[in-house]
Image (cartoon, grey):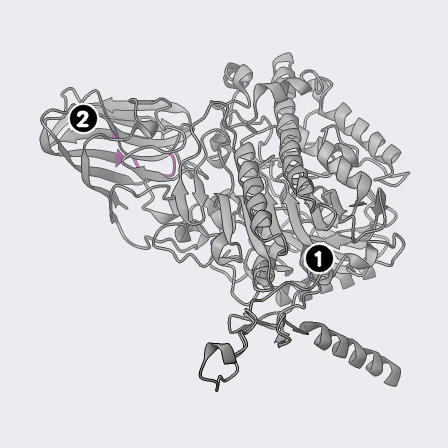
Amino acid sequence: MKSKNLILWVAALILSIASRVTDAAGTEIDRTRLPIPQPAPAPVTALLPEDVELPTPWEVRAPEGAPNVVIILLDDIGFGAPSPFGGPVSMPTLQQLADTGISYNRFHTIALCAPTRAALKSGRNHHRVNMGSIPEIATGYSGNTTVVPNNAAPIAEILRQNGYNTGAFGKWHETPGRETTAAGPQTRWPTRQGFEKFYGFIGAEENMYEPSLHDGVTVIDFPDKPGYHLLEDMTDQAISWVRQQQGLRPDKPFFIYYSSAGSHSPHQVASEWIERYRGKFDQGWDVTREKTHRDQIALGVVPKGTQLPPKPASVPDWNDLSDDQRRIFARQAEVFAAFTEYADYQAGRLLEAIDDLGELDNTLVFYISGDNGTSSEGNQTGHWNWGHFLNGVPETTEEQLEYLDEWGGPTTYAHMAVGWAIAFDAPFAFTKQVAGDFGGTRNGTVVHWPSGIKAKGELREQFTHVIDVVPTILEATGIPEPEMVDGVTQIPIQGTSMMYSFDNANAPERHTTQYFEVVGNRGLYQDGWLARTTVKLPWESEKMNSVAADDGWELYNTLADFSLTNNLADEYPERLASMKATFMKEAVANQVLPLDDRLLERLLPSVAGRPTMMGERTELDLYPGSWDLVEDSILSFKNVSSSVIADLSVSKDLKADGVIIAQGSRFGGWSFYIEDGYPCYTYNNLGDLVTVKSKRRLPPGDSEMRLDIDYDGGGAGKGALMKLSVNGKVMATERLESTVASRFSIDEGTDVGMDRGSPVIQRQLNDRRFSAFNGTINKVTLAIYPD
């Protein structure tokens, strides 16, 4: 016991010495309390400048030799997709890093995107930082509010306050929608979470051709150039930033969080990339899954003897599909694979630029090839317009055939059928959202650091988790875990550094216990065993088990059963009971409870118990310059009667033209506008347009345009009567047989004075970008009339 205490004392002493180092002027600094205070200047007693020695300029510098850090995170790509891990999707950049770095075949995420991101950047479990799900389905319970607390400073802030420059590019998805406007707070924006530079999108997903973008906290327009694609744009921005940073301060390390939109829906990529995969998935998802399984074993990323678990019975066999279905589904996979390879290519451009700067050898790169398993949120058929999924609307084969040649282009918001998600998650049975299955949580990951890792091209089989990235970075950079940041005492980091495994393939794993939970699906890993229960598969309507009954638990020996094929619950009931008890302890300690297995229902704030910016308000005034206001930040026009009232002024020599206000995108929303002088309102019901148009042009001078929707009631998504009035006179009426029940758009919000991003009416009105209005908008009032 004395020996153990001595070891602990020595370890604490070493940590204390490491955290208290001297700056360039020889002043001791303490890196455990951030920000590091500037030392008080020495008193000056001499009268003249020539009698006083100039003090050394003070700044916080990173520890000597600390590496640059780059995190590359792809989206919705499972373990069985990337070629370096045996999949059918070519990913040369990931392969090159694997050949000169080390690969992890037991690296885990959290089965849903925002929770993975919050855990990745904080080093804490996702519920512990309130990110139990995603902001769009947040609830009011601690652990699920998606309001990231200030007692878990993210790695970007730790590095920034320790002398790093920091930049984030691409997807964010950690800010509640109600906090994404000029009204703030901006606490949970990237530039308040440690990043000095941010270029990308705040929400869950984005249109690759017509995105809604932010630079810092400023809404910006995407570049107006032929062939524009967001992944190329964000990569250009990242390259430009790191070149400038290194040109100005080559002595200062950088941290880049490169969060690709590939390959979350919408699957959108240029046709020349899609052509690379033409015909390569004609054999179907069953054959693809089987071949991937064989290739994984041949490569050694999956142990010999690993079985392929049965495909879920609700997923049809490829051979049972019609010829038209097979054509459609093969095209879906071609587009997904092309989008994924393109994402890998763009990540490669960034790393090549870093290499050109001479910095790649001393850059610690984490390339995580997905933030969860492949998404099955395309359900049984996939979608040309993923808005149908969000609103529970199926698509027919005939409808999809109409869009077959356009799949992946700007007129589609594409997703693929669940059969492909199962195939691209091989050798596992399930997908994204299924937190107790490695198909939902295991992602092939490569770590590359030539000057810090001797091993090349080797495989690491220790259990690792996304919360392990932060402590790995801290150990590699020589920066201690902070005890206090900005005056707030920090909760302990929960991850385990991976550095022990960098040059020791046989090192015993140190991350031995880890819980998993997303929308009720849950599990516990402990010392090589996995206990799990699945409440519901994302593409099925019926629940398999019950949260209330706490039933359906299974048990697997993951060290002997890589793919989770052999349920041992009946053979080891005591072990299972013990692990279930441990899960509950972890759940209490990490704010997991209460368990909530609802999903799409929670898109509606009133159902989820999630606060909105509007609260109980029924009226809202908006003005020009109000752009990209997401649905959780304004009044909800769904399933209620409502009005849009525009106070306009048009000069006598001008024929009014342009968008007054629009919400959503070409794939769902509404737009109030004037075309060739005629007031119009178009309701876009997930791609189906219904327009009401005035019989007379808007007169010059001051006018009031008004659109009233008289909702039928009786539930969600019902019909309504639209009535268009100008200066108090009814000009036209039109009937809506149904309306959007849940969500117009995840990515595109409301714009006043134009329709930024993709146009709701699916076309340009005039020669002004985004169909900007050419008159004066004095005010637009939105009103709802709840029952």
Res 169 seen here: yes
Specify start and end residues of the magenta stretch as a single range: 710-721
Where in the figure is residue 554, as x and y percent of width and height?
76, 50
**In the rendered image, which residue does mark 2 sit on?**
656
Q: Is residue 8 left or right of residue 755?
A: right
Mark 2, other Cα within 10 Å: few <14 / some 14–19 / many ≥20:
many
User: From the viewer's perspective, is residue 660 above or below residue 271?
Assistant: below
Mark sitting earlier along the chain (1/2)? 1
The amino acid beneath tag 1 is Asp
Q: Secondary structure at mark 1?
A: helix
State the image quarter where residue 382 is shown.
top right
Return the x and y of residue 395 as percentages of the image width and height: 51, 24
Inspect this view and state whether residue 547 appears: no
- Residue 99 belongs to magenta span: no
Q: Is there a contact, CB below 8 Å, between mark 1 and mark 2?
A: no
Prevailing SS of the magenta stretch: loop
SS at circle 2: loop
Numbered mark located on residue 363 in the image: none
**Residue 718 included in the magenta stretch of the image:** yes
Picture disc at residue 468: 1
Q: Quadrant of the N terminus?
A: bottom right
Question: Who's the residue at 77% across and 63% down the image?
Answer: 578
Image location of residue 630, percent across then percent down: 39, 44
**Which three-letter amino acid code belongs to the residue tagged 2?**
Ala
Residue neighbourhood size for the residue with mark 1, other residues' Cα within 10 Å, grouped as few (<14), some (14–19), many (≥20): many
